[in-house]
Amino acid sequence: MIPSRPPRTLSLSKQLFGILLPMKKTTSRLPTLAFIDIETTGSNYDRDRITEVGIKTLHEDQVEVWESLLNPQVFIPQNIQRITGISPQMVEGQPDFSELAQELYRQLEDKIFVAHNARFDYGFLKSSFKRIGIDFKPKVLCTVKLSRHLFPEQKRHNLDTLIQVHGLQVSARHRALGDADLLLQFWNICEARFGTEKLLAAIDHITAHTSLPAHIDKDLVNQIPASPGVYIFYAENKMPLYIGKSIDMRARVLSHFQNNLTDRKEIKLSMQIRDIDWIETSGELGALLLESQLIKERLPSMNIKLRRSKDLCAWQLHETEGGMLTSKLVTHRDLLPGLQDNLYGLFYSQREALQCLTAIAKRHQLCSVVIGLEKQVEHKSCFAYQVKQCKGACLGLETVTSHNLRLKMALDAFRVKSWPYSGPIAIAEGEQMHVIDRWCYLGSAINHDELDELSREGIAEFDLDIYKILKKKLSSLPNSQIVQLSR
């Protein structure tokens, strides 16, 4: 294995350990609003599932659109199909909620969640996130309540009434993005009629107000910049309590302290917090990298314990004498992520790796004998074939070429990407340069001397969370933001 060392943050780390750089006072700005609508298979949070999500985000007069069909993996009742027009054929092959959860969370993070009869949409999304271990608790604005607040003379405030009363233009009723667009139209009409200040006052009136913990001074919170970075909550004796990140640190910190808190974790956090610290970064990538690094280094008591990557393993495909592809588990002793081709997965344990490959085999009707999950018994099929979950490769009923192709396609989404550069690189983000080599985060620099120092030092320990962050980010970065470095 290559010797490793922990990643470092050079000048930036001075802010964390007591030498805070001067803070610039920031002016308040309009909140970012995410107008959202969902379609579901019914009204029961536990039984039913989401079939479509549509979001129109309004930020400084700019509108961004995001929508997706989802495979609910449950039956869509006929009456729901008639109302929404969403059929089983339309959602077949679409991603399920767990596959889109991270992207959906990013679409809604640090934004006001605006929905009509918001309890329904918020309740479904919160339950869906909870099932996969994500705590989702945005600031919520219900447009039914907004309509009642601004138009008290109206007797009804359902969406069809708003369409009729305000002359909203219907593009696709009972489809997620179409209904989200109606909410955006309603907001624009309200803003034109009442003005921004009155709408902001209405938001404050309808949504929960913040209530700072007793030991936290309002002036301290006011110093927190509304910019990207990482914030640290401390308990007594400067013990790290919680570490988080945001593209708007002040808004995110305030969101932890809501008057209507019902989450036990947030209540406990509010009772224990004694101090707040923060580190500004030049953008979202710097915040993501620094948060992951600091949580592992400082082990705050109320963060989910992120696992270190010392015992990682992955699957590798090998060809047998008969030409069949089978899988072999590569353990951490022989694993060099980023340098080895033909790696699939990256798992924290052998048990996790076996569970994943077993699920893939079942989903794609692959032969468990051929891929190495089950021992071959001469002249007998695998167990999966007996229950009609294998196409018979173990008995020669499926060709070598066919099974190999299906196995490769099934594993493709889990392929570990090889490091695409000849050496270390620096990713430019604002005034910072994030130095990366073989998917390892070496640290962040703000001048050429620091950049040169980081690029010449040894490889840091490979971290799976950092790899996932970088893999996604590098796929969308323009070449102009990437500088290849020499050792």
Image (tube, rainbow, N blue to C red):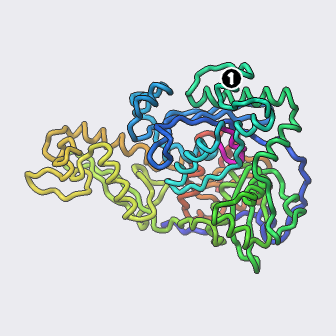
Q: Nearer the viewer, residue 399 or 392?
A: 392
Whole-percent x and y of residue 16? Answer: 78, 67
Give residue 395's position: percent from left, percent from top. Answer: 13, 45
Between residue 440 and residue 251, name the one nearer to us: 251
In the image, 311: left or right of 234? Answer: left
x and y, in percent, of residue 250 in the image:
80, 55
Please tell me which residue is depicted at 44% across the width and 46% down the height of the picture.
47
Q: Is residue 69 left or right of residue 162?
A: left
Q: Is residue 202 magenta?
A: no
Is 108 one of the magenta-colored residues? Answer: yes
Q: Position of residue 51 (x, y in %)?
A: 49, 36
Residue that mark 1 sits on: 163
Q: Which residues are magenta?
A: 107-115
- Describe residue 319's horizontal placement relative to residue 111 as left or right: left
Q: Residues within 10 Å of mark 1 (few under 14, many from 20)?
A: some
Secondary element under disc 1, as helix, strand or loop, is helix
Residue occupying the point 19% across, 48% down: 387
For the residue pair 230 and 289, the one nearer the viewer reads as 230
